[in-house]
Image: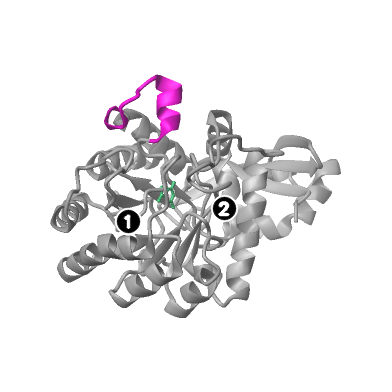
Amino acid sequence: MQRSIYIRPVGLFPAPSDEGDKAWGGLPLTGQPLRFAAVEIIERNGKTTIRRIVALGEAFERDWGRHTLAASDLLEAIREPRMRLAGLSLDRPRIMGIVNVTPDSFSDGGMLGSAQDAIDHGLRLAEEGADILDIGGESTRPGADPVSLEEELARVMPVIEGLRARTEVRISIDTRKAEVMRCAAAAGVDIVNDVSALTHDPQSLAVAAETGLSVILMHSQGDPKTMNKDPQYSDVAFDVFDFLEKRVAACEAAGIPKSKLVADPGIGFGKHLHHNVAVMSALSLYHALGVPVLLGASRKKLIDHICDVPNPKDRVPGSLAAALAGAAQGVQIVRVHDVAATRQALAVWQAALSGTDKILG
Ligand code: 9MG
């Protein structure tokens, strides 16, 4: 299904700390201490897209008023406070630290040579302030080959078990395989992170529902091996929205409630630079899915394309800029390699935005 009308919150500003301040305008955004002052109303008809930004006071007036009314479900979803995710409140941007247990990971390949290295790395990220540790045993970088179930389990299970025994921090399992989800759930992970949005393995939807875990649904076009060869979209930001909306519906139909879902537009997954930046500039659109939004741009190729930094380890400044751009659009979770630096950047951003040094967390 392709929607014909979309609503995107724009003009985000900090909510007042004093809830009794009746003079405050705008509408609340997903229960965060953020409000939006205007909406972008997007009319989509086949390949034509008309976009206009309207102040909230005018959103129900003139000819675009009927569009706002037609998409009032989206407006409601944008305002609705989000539930806790695996026990984590989402009233401030949360940090997911990356623990790749793959020999060919694109940015820290070879660094985490053993399970013990990966466990130590995860504990360091937790100390630096990660709210979630994302453990993955199959590289999903563009061009990567798939790994067997046995190999993936051998890589991730000792790391999950080691971290679960040593830290209370939430753990997510980055996998596309139902059996890995099942084993990881039994070992105590809190969240499933599937870059195929539970489409790769025919069993994954049922298994994810059975585990009762929260699930991150990421958009990708094609398989990691070939996805960036020739990705095609009609209008990327909205095609991604339609895909994620369908996956949220499929999860609900399979018994996974919306309160356990997170949506992720999948930066770099079947997207060229112009697709990635179009998605990044439209991030607040995805709040209309009614679930928290995750952004993963850390050390990715788009930073090289924009700034000419071939070595992923030199992409930290670009990664911080991407995380802050996400936070400014109300993204609730950022997936990053550099936890300490991201935490510092987000804390300063929050203080500067809100004008208070009493930063949550
Ligand atoms: C595993 N993985 C690599 N990049 C990712 C991203 O952007 N989002 C999510 N959810 N997972 C990712």
Task: Give 294 or 63, whichever is nearer the viewer.
Answer: 294
Residue sitting at 61 percent across and 38 percent down?
231
| Residue 312 in sight here | yes
Give the residue type that dot 2 points to.
His
Residue 136, image x, y percentages? 33, 56
Few, some or many residues within 10 Å of mark 1 (<14, 14–19, 20+): many
Which numbered disc, 1 or 2, marks the residue that appears first in the sequence? 1
- Dot 2: element: helix
Kindly identify which residue carries mark 2: 287
Residue 285, image x, y percentages? 60, 46
Whether residue 304 is in magenta: the answer is: yes
* Image quarter in which the N terminus is found: bottom right
Q: Residue furthest bottom?
A: 210
Kindly identify which residue carries mark 1: 137
Q: Nearer the viewer, mark 1 or mark 2?
A: 1
Query: Left of 262 or right of it: where is 274?
Result: right
The answer to which image quadrant residue 160 occupies is bottom left
Residue 338, image x, y percentages? 26, 41
The boundaries of the magenta stretch are: 300-314
Give the residue type that dot 1 points to.
Gly
